Image: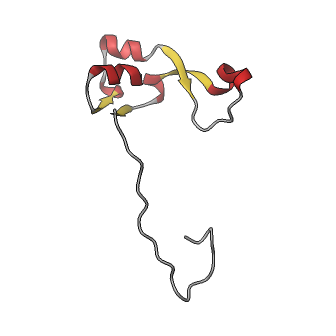
Amino acid sequence: MERQFHDSGLDRGVLTIGDLSGELHDRLQAERLERFIGVVYRPEMELQSHYANVELAGQFDAYVWFDTTSAVEPLPTAVQQGGPDTWPFGV
């Protein structure tokens, strides 16, 4: 899906899948492989452990596309004086 949006030349966009009908909706109902994020990489079992057959129209209500993104910059922090020491859980 990312490739089709990238090739469209649009920098960003939203595709509301629930409102679609006709050929585009039918094509989005076709099963395709989706790669999981955050899995343990096992090269010998890549297809079985990293991908699943999914139906985009049945899985999502909308698809949001950004061709280019950047990392989130953290907000500034300060140590509170006199507060309990709860590092790393009491942020």
Q: Which of the 4 image quadrants contains residue 57?
A: top left
Horizontally, residue 51 falls left or right of residue 17, namely right
Q: Residue furthest left?
A: 10
Residue 63 in the image: above or below residue 88:
above
Write the residue at 44% across / 16% down.
29
In the image, residue 71 above or below residue 23: below
Q: Quadrant of the C terminus?
A: bottom right
Task: Tally the marks.
Answer: 0
User: Does residue 26 sit above or below 46 in this rendering?
Assistant: above
**Quadrant of the rendered structure where residue 62 is?**
top left
Task: Using the image as rendered, state which of residue 15 and residue 37 is in the foreground.
Answer: 37
Q: Position of residue 80 (x, y in %)?
A: 51, 82
Q: How is the image coloured?
A: secondary structure
**What residue is drawn where x is 31% and y is 21%?**
20
Residue located at (30% from left, 26% from top): 19
Task: Specify whether 34 is left or right of 22.
Answer: right
The x, y position of residue 4, in whole percent, is 36, 19
Q: In terms of depth relative to the viewer, which is nearer, 90 or 78?
A: 78
The quadrant in which the N terminus is found is top left
Percent position (x, y) of residue 50? 63, 27
Is 83 located above or below residue 65 in the figure? below
Query: In x, y percent, where is residue 64?
Result: 35, 34
Res 56 → quadrant: top left
Taking the image as shown, residue 20 lies to the left or right of residue 47, namely left
- What residue is shown at x 39% (from left), y 32% (from top)? 61
